[in-house]
Image (spheres, rainbow, N blue to C red):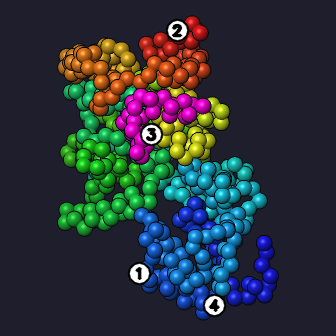
Amino acid sequence: SEASPSATEDINLIITRGGSWKNVHAINNGIFLLRNTAWSIRHCFEIFTSRYSYTRFLGRSLVDQPIQLSLLLAQNELMWPPKDEIEMGQHVMVVPKRRLNSFRRNPLYSNVDAEEGGQWERGDFLAHFASNNKYSLMVDLLDQEKLPGVPPVEERYSFPLPAPGVEHDQYTNAGTCWCNDKQIHCMPKYHVIGVHKAGSKSLMRYLAGNPGLAHSPHVEDPVRWLTDSTLAAEEKKCNVLREKDKAKPHYHGYPDPIYINKGDTSHALTTCSFTDYTLLHGKFTTNEGFCFDGKVPGLEKPMFDEMVIWEHGPSKVRGVGLPDLFHRLQPSARMLITIRDAVEVFYSAYNHFGEFGVTKKSPEHFHAFARDLTSFWNESGCTVANFRTCLPPELVQGGSWLSRALYSEHLPLWLDSFGCSQIHLFDVSVDPYEEVQRLYDFMGTPDNRAAFNVTRAAYRVHEVTKKDSTRNNALNKNSYGPMLDATRVQLEDFYLPYNKKLCDVMAVHECLRVPLFQKHCHVVDGK
């Protein structure tokens, strides 16, 4: 209800609730109105000088908001827990979010925002981009509403389009490389982009075993600078590491690549920027990454890396689809994609990543989980592009596992930008030796002896798998029992319409005619 003029005479702060306001964020101070009064000056001074906050409001990236809320509660300006979205204190008025603070943010929070009536809608006073990917959200909104002010594609990113090596024709066999202030920068020629839990780690081992190929010892780089998904905590850590690098005695204007190691391994990492990414791979070429007379030396061995970007394929990055953006950045890139039976990918991801509190993972639990997820997916019309907003929060992670092997939805996006000549599918369902030979031929480094050596271990694991019923698949590190037959039938029914669509795509793109997909088409024809 509207407050009377007399009731608002002492109001100095007008603010709104945050997301999940009944439990945590009783206010959101991303946007608020503050009257120029003595009370307001004192309030700001208290926020900036206070060392006090209720613990429950603290977060990894929130500092001033928890302090501000704690002060307002301690001074009895607001009540805890909040009862209504609207609240009136002696000096503070809390108004509905859509009055001045409508959220437009990461899809992970869209369901909560919609339920609380705080999601931006046409006609709202303004939009608050309360997310790490603010620029993408802004461009999407401008484009959606057909508003002026959308910058040209070439000006939207923190990296050049195309990469400098493309501009100056500095292609090498290694990839797209160029010199900048005596340092070599490189984008590898080949990129393993997925599919996670479909044999991508085996593929990386096979590649590393070919002496004709070059690579850095790093894997699983999510290249968040490319997908516009950098986390606030990661950005802060990158800035700290960059300042430390500048303080090194050997710096002299030649920076080291900055990246964050993941966990206790130095192999899995997150590069902090495009420049850090290209410097990192430039250092694994020759001469510790330095140029000769301003020119890139002849780099003969093709380079490869692993990018964790498969699930971002259907997403737009600042208004441009990721495959299109990648092609604009590196038109000569070659994409390596592992494929495995979709049902097995889903089950492997469930066993590897699934956390369900006190509930123990089991074939029976997986059956119920898969049943609920696929039913909700179909009834709600979810897709690989919208499942994060389509599914309820407790099913979003499962949606990621379910959707990553919907090849009919993902592959056409990459084929539209790169075409068959630049995409290779590695089919883990067939004989490893023959498939590795085919892989090496695609990369221009045929080596039958290397193919034999790198696949010997795979044959041994397959033999162990046959003897050990607790191993569901030779590719899995972990042991777990096979799924129920009823679950397999249920999931095969779910994937069937997608496989039918895949068969139509195969008719157009010859590079998709691999044994696994051909097997799916035989099943489709028999239905």
Q: Amino acid at mark 2?
A: His
- The image position of residue 85, as x and y in percent, is 67, 67
Residue positioned 59% across, 64% down in the render: 22
Find disc 4 in the rendering and name its residue.
Answer: 37
The numbered mark, 3 or 4, whose residue comes first in the sequence reads 4
Residue at left offset 49%, top offset 85%: 46
Residue annotated with mark 1: 51
Q: Nearer the viewer, mark 3 or mark 4?
A: 4
Residue 93 spot, x, y in % from top left: 67, 78
Residue 195: within the magenta?
no
Pointer 2 with pointer 3, Cβ within 8 A: no
Query: Relative to the observer, which residue lies in front, 512 or 497?
Result: 497
Residue 126 in the figure: left or right of residue 404: right
On residue 507, which mark appears?
Answer: none
Residues shaded magenta: 346-375
- The local crowd at label 4, few if under 14, some if 14 to 19, many if 20 or more residues have their Cα within 10 Å, is few
Residue ID at (36%, 14%): 430
Q: Quadrant of the N terminus?
A: bottom right
What is the distance, in whole Å, between disc 2 and disc 1 at their CAs?
A: 67 Å
Label number found at residue 309 = 3
Q: Amino acid at mark 1?
A: Arg
Amino acid type, callout 3:
Ile
In the image, residue 337 sits, relative to residue 265, either above or below, namely above
Left or right: 407, with 183 as reference point: right
Q: Which residue is mark 2?
A: 522
Q: Residue furthest top?
A: 526
Q: Decide: marks 3, 4 in contact (CB < 8 A)? A: no
Of badges 2 and 1, the one in the foreground is 1
